[in-house]
């Protein structure tokens, strides 16, 4: 599916349905300010409700992958290692001036191991990082989904290799930095701005008016940070991409994630017991019998019994 190497996490039917349901709910969680009318229960209770549902669906995605056989022991070990590495390198940037060190690994790993692996890695990386840094809060499910979509999108990019692939991943990493920031702002925009402001969320406005307010809000408050994230991700992909892509692909080849199994019908002339063809078996049998039978050599006139020579015959 990724076109660039073996897929470590195969997306089965149950996994695909769970991913679709989780992604749909994620979109609802991000875009509810544009679709929930004023005065409805959703405008007040929807965010905390989605918080719990998102956490449950993230776990459901991982369990569905395991149940479908998409995550075997080798893929699970690789997932754990990369999640720990990503959680460890994330505090190096700490979001200062938009610098983020978590996305480049999601892009490269999703590219090599496939979209399913990238989705799960995005969820587990952010979850482990939140536990490590004490960043657990209502924003965590949104961050998990944002990173999960970044990893999944990298696995869905078209196949290419060499410099073309590196340039594609760098451009994708930069764009994903902007999209991630654009989506994450939706998680807190309705609650963090003065209701009297011209860029604040105002229940009851039309979609066009809400959209205009949010675009202005994002440009004024987040565009600079998103640019730092985009530049950092693209630069790290260019710097570490050649080495990490080679390393990941070598690890995937040696781990042999779910090697293809093929069944070939036995040849009509193959001896089931020895594996030799029927045309070869008689010749081997005759040769072995000839080698084991003593060769008689005419004895002397004295009538002495012939004796076996060193080559297996008699003398």
Image (cartoon, helix red, strand yellow):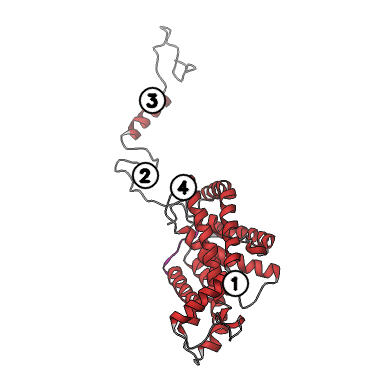
**Which residue is label 4 attached to?**
164
Q: Which mark is residue 290?
A: 3
Rounded to the nearest whole Å, what is the CA distance between mark 1 and mark 2? Answer: 74 Å
Q: Residue placed farthest to the top in the image? A: 301
Rounded to the nearest whole Å, what is the CA distance between mark 4 and mark 2? Answer: 51 Å
**Which residue is label 2 attached to?**
272
Q: Of tags 1 and 2, which is closer to the observer?
A: 1
Rounded to the nearest whole Å, what is the CA distance between mark 1 and mark 4? Answer: 34 Å
Q: Secondary structure at mark 2?
A: loop
Quadrant of the rendering where the C terminus is positioned: top left
Q: Secondary structure at mark 3?
A: helix
> From where the camera sits, is residue 59 visible?
no
| Total numbered labels | 4
Magenta residues span 8-13
Rounded to the nearest whole Å, what is the CA distance between mark 3 and mark 4? Answer: 66 Å
The answer to which of marks 4 and 2 sits earlier in the sequence is: 4
């Amino acid at each position: 599916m990724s076109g660039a190497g073996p897929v470590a996490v195969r997306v089965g039917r149950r996994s695909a349905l769970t991913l679709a349901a989780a992604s749909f709910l994620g979109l609802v969680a991000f875009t509810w300010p544009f679709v929930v009318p004023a005065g409805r229960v959703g405008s007040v209770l929807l965010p905390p409700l989605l918080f719990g549902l998102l956490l449950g669906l993230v776990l459901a995605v991982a369990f569905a992958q395991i149940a479908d056989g998409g995550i075997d022991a080798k893929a699970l070990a690789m997932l754990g290692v990369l999640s720990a590495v990503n959680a460890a390198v994330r505090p190096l940037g700490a979001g200062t001036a938009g610098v983020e060190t978590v996305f480049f690994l999601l892009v490269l790993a999703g590219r090599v191991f496939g979209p399913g692996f990238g989705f799960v890695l995005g969820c587990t990386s952010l979850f482990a990082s939140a536990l490590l840094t004490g960043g657990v809060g209502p924003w965590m499910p949104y961050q998990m989904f944002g990173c999960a979509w970044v990893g999944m999108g990298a696995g869905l990019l078209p196949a290419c290799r060499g410099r073309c692939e590196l340039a594609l991943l760098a451009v994708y990493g930069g764009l994903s930095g902007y999209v991630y920031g654009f989506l994450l702002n939706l998680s807190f925009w309705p609650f963090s701005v003065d209701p009297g402001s011209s860029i604040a969320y105002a229940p009851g406005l039309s979609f066009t008016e809400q959209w205009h307010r949010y675009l202005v809000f994002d440009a004024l408050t987040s565009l600079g940070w998103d640019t730092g994230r985009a530049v950092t991700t693209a630069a790290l992909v260019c710097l570490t991409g050649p080495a990490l892509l080679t390393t990941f692909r070598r690890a995937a080849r040696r781990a042999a994630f779910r090697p293809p199994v093929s069944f070939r019908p036995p040849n009509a002339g193959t001896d089931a017991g020895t594996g030799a063809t029927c045309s070869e078996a008689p010749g081997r049998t005759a040769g072995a019998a000839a080698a084991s039978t003593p060769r008689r050599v005419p004895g002397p006139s004295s009538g002495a019994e012939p004796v076996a020579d060193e080559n297996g015959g008699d003398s």
